[in-house]
Amino acid sequence: MNQPPSVTPRRAWLVWGIALAIYVLAVFHRTSLAVAGLEATERFDLTASQLSSFTMLQLLVYAGMQIPVGLLIDRFGARSVLTVGVTLVSAAQAWFALASSYPEALTARVFVGMGDAMTFICVLRLVSSWFAPRRIPLIVQLTGSTGQIGAIAAAVPMTLALRELGWSGAYLVAAAIGPVLLLLLLLFVDDSPVQRHLTGQPMSRTVLLGSLRASWAQPGTRLGFWVHFATPFSAHVISLLWGFPFLVVSEGVSATTAGLLLSLIVVATVSSGPALGWLVGRHPWHRSTTALIAVAVTAATWTVVLAWPGNAPLWLLALLMVVCGSAGPVSMIGFDVARTSNPPERLASASGIINQGGFVAALIAVFAIGVVLDLMTPGDATPSGSEAFHAAMSVQYVLWALGALQIWRYRRKVRRLLPRAVVESGSTMIA
């Protein structure tokens, strides 16, 4: 892989801006069902488990494609893979707009997940190719945080679009943005400052498996995976599917207020990312500690909300959104660990392994919440009652406990590899 320049050229910001816009669009498509869950229930006559299957299958596809996408980027370059990604996610969203049956809509969401899976790791590779090493941690944080603007657009604006344009109109308008960004990508984005298409050597099955095994053998890669597993999934659960029904049905807020609260979680994500990037850059030895603190604070805030007698007050629900949103950028620590634990030729595949973590956790949580709701409200197409939702949301504690235990386990292994003085000197940043 070509080394990034020591001084960031102006064109790097243009390349990053276009790639970031595509990632924002992918996040929008990923989360666009969050405020449309009740409409989808009526349109396709769904149970809670069937509704959760949209997000569950989409996340399953996303997580399952991370390693193949990483290998494709290593082989064909970020520009080519990103081109396929934006084309696929836009076409799939148009298909979802016109779907008239549950199986058809479910299939469309599968392809949304496939296109979505091809965006974020491509942006990370472009950042590594275009920016100086000292800037990369901050740009990665800005990418992860700013990308969540797509979730803001999928909250209140999407709610209004559904009301004014209807199901098909709202989703078709959203799908039409993709071709515009595709044109900008083809005109202005190159894989590196010196090469339009940066491709790797063809790899045999043996070499591919060896590369994956080498990436996973790195304790830093495993630490990154569990950091990404434990920190962002609660925000995904809220923003992708169950937040809107939880707020409206269980906590008794209006649809408009619920949309505003969902927007708040994204505002917290966007605003906390740069500060976290600065903090981690100044104190690299404490990256895993930061992740553990984020897990503890998120779990504690959920505990207060779920234990509150009656409906939680609005200020507490707003605090929950801020805490969950602020925990999301902590997952970016996992990618920084991958960058400092793996050679450049394995960076995309290691990032793919790590990027699976949060989405595997979200997949498990989304599915488990739907199952608990169905068990506690049998026969109800729309789950009702705070007791059922409170019990369902409690499944998150199992995932927090598992993730925190594994972070603690692997950070001890990583820290034994190098003396603390070496890590803090800036020559490497592993834990």
Image (spheres, grey):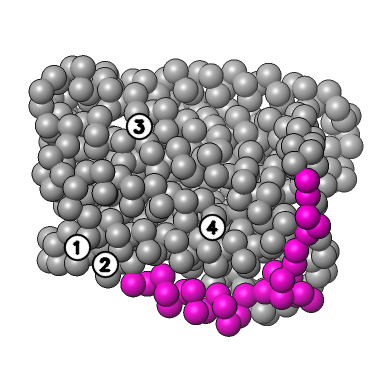
Q: CA distance from mark 3 to mark 2?
A: 26 Å
Side (left or right) of 389 relative to 64: left
- Categorize mark 4 by other alpha carbons within 10 Å: few (<14), some (14-19), many (20+): many
Q: On the image, numbered disc 4 is attached to which residue?
A: 119
Q: On the image, numbered disc 2 is attached to which residue?
A: 172
**Region in magenta:** 176-204
Residue 168: numbered disc: 1
Sequence-wise, the earlier of marks 3 and 1 is: 1
Percent position of residue 344, x then y: 80, 52
Q: On the image, numbered disc 3 is attached to which residue?
A: 366
CB under 8 Å between callouts 4 and 3? no
- Which element type, helix, strand or loop, lies under badge 4? loop
Percent position of residue 246, x then y: 22, 34
Identified by mark 4, the residue type is: Thr
Q: Is residue 322 above or below residue 195?
A: above
Sequence-wise, the earlier of marks 1 and 4 is: 4
Side (left or right) of 92 relative to 41: right
CB under 8 Å between callouts 1 and 2? yes
Identified by mark 2, the residue type is: Leu
Q: Nearer the viewer, residue 328 or 19?
A: 19
Sequence-wise, the earlier of marks 4 and 2 is: 4
